[in-house]
Image (spheres, grey):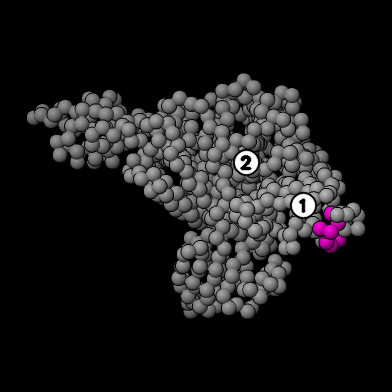
Amino acid sequence: MSCKLTVMLSDNKYDIICEENSRLIDILSNNSIHLSAPCGGKCFCGKCKVIVEGDTSCEDAEKPFLSEDEINSGVRLACVKRITQDTVVKIPNIDNAKIAIGGIMRDTKLNPIVTKKALSLDTPRLDNSNHDLDRLLAAAGNYRINIHALQMLGKLSAKNITDITAVIIGDEIVAVEEGDSTGTNFSVAVDIGTTTIVAYLVNLANGTVVGNASTINKQNIFGSDVISRINHTIETGDDTQMQKIVSEQINSLCNELAEKQSIDKSNIYSVMLTGNTVMLHFACGFSTASISKVPFNSVTIAPQILRPSDIGISTGLKLFLPSSFSSYVGADITTAAAACELDKSEKVSLLVDIGTNGEILLGNKHKCVCCATAAGPAFEGAHIEKGIGGVSGAINKFVMDKDAGIHIETINDEPAIGICGSGVLDIVAQLLKYGIIDETGRMLDKSEIPQPFNAFVQGEGIDVRFYITDEIYLSAGDVRELQLAKASIAAGINVLMKEYSATADNIETVYLAGGFGSYMNSDSAVMIGLLPKELQNKITVCGNAAGNGAVSMLLNKDLFYNLPLLNCEYIDLSTNLDFQTEYIDCMMF
């Protein structure tokens, strides 16, 4: 028996026919409707809240995550709710996220990955050696030519058109166009993050970025971290589901960029993808099963040149994927390193990309070492009880004062609805500063805290909470989550410094990249021990360095083909004895 599900999302309405007793979260994912589910629908995060009209039932499994007011208002968890009759569901719109787009940009000469040549072909003759391809190569030089370009060449020849433009990628003519179109040459760089996807429209004719677009990565319905998503693909045996989600989102972003800039999509000739190794595997439809288990090998970390249509992307004639360093230090670090010009520098730099996954690189043009840490969801707010992504209303700044009390700021100055990663960092730093959290990470009971801050504390022991608003709090468990995450990053940095025989004095610059790294307060990061205090004055926030590095590779093809940053040793922290010791030491605040 089937039921009708009506989904209300922003200004959109979706009518879906589904099988009776189907889980709501499964129905939504099967119909490409976005809903964040950090735990992958396992019912232990309580973040997949929806409003079910007229619903009077509430399952025991979801009650711990819902207030009495929410239950009475029809708020339910999509991972628990089953559709047993015709139902109307409203989903909160979270596409208004604050996404890192700008940041550091490499100063590079224009040597684009796609070039154009204006050509004048000989007039056809009654000559057996004067065919269309012969005349094209006589004018252009010694290139390969693909079937697509040959088809276009034949159509132009049939119209007796001899003034044309050849579109060239590498040693191949990929398209031919009528007249001189050398001034129209666009490509798109896409950074596929675990949490967000950002696309940049690049004018290769003059070397400028003319537009950008971004969105939440809709794969998060299967979990906020890569392991949850890998496990989902293993459980379902479907390596194409994640691919379909991301290719549809990339197509949507490319369409948006072309429309905003009034550009014909046929003039977008290539797409450069960057992201961590798992995200690129998902995009290509590669199996990720081996990445999640010893010895953690991937299908490939080598650079790839594909046809976009091979993976469901409808824009461009060539698709470029830069090289990765390992299964867990991906092309996003390769492109970020390019953006920060680490391949040119004699001086030692530290690159830390803190997002849903933590990737760290230390070194210079001659030598570098890198590692990956399981920092994960705490920095994105996912495993924090009142945590939320960087959307409107998320508390992203927090300050305490003995006289003035507490002061919060939210994204877009909207009413507070939760705490994002940078807000969690600030809160823990301030609670440490005023002794509400001790060096072990224990949050003190109300009776142990002097006025005026004891008024914000409720509960005891493992149930103690610090209230920021009447509904939003930081719990003792949240502090432990942050401890685990910060200890992982800090220990990774310490291990790389040992492996490189570097001290804080040797490191000239610390580049903070990624969604969380772009918005966090570096003073708070140092205060909780996420970053060494000796490096505090060397920190440069570089925004979405991965995306900007991908742009640089479009602007200068040598960075894609010959990036001189290959002398990099991957340090596997899971087998590194120093890491275990460092990790325990770094747990302390």
Q: Where is residue 150 in the image (x, y as percent from the top left)?
A: 24, 38
Q: Which mark is residue 518?
A: 2
Of pointers 2 and 1, the one earlier in the residue sequence: 1
Residue flagged by tag 2: what amino acid is it?
Answer: Ser
Q: Relative to residue 383, is residue 153 drawn left or right?
A: left
Which of these two is toward me, 506 or 169? Answer: 506
Q: Position of residue 192 (x, y in %)?
A: 52, 45
Question: How many residues crowd mark 1 within 10 Å: few (<14), some (14–19), many (20+)?
Answer: some
Which of these two is toward me, 210 or 529? Answer: 210
- Characterize the magenta stretch by its predominant secondary structure: helix
Considering only vertical position in the picture, is 377 above or below 549? Answer: below
Residue flagged by tag 1: what amino acid is it?
Answer: Ile
Residue 431, visible in the rendered structure: no
Q: Which residue is drawn at 22% across and 25% down?
A: 138
Q: Residue at x 51, y 27 (%)?
A: 107
Residue position marked by numbered label 1 in the rendering: 406
Classify mark 1: helix, strand or loop. Answer: strand
Magenta residues span 453-462
For the residues carrying marks 2 and 1, which lies nearer the camera in this image? 1
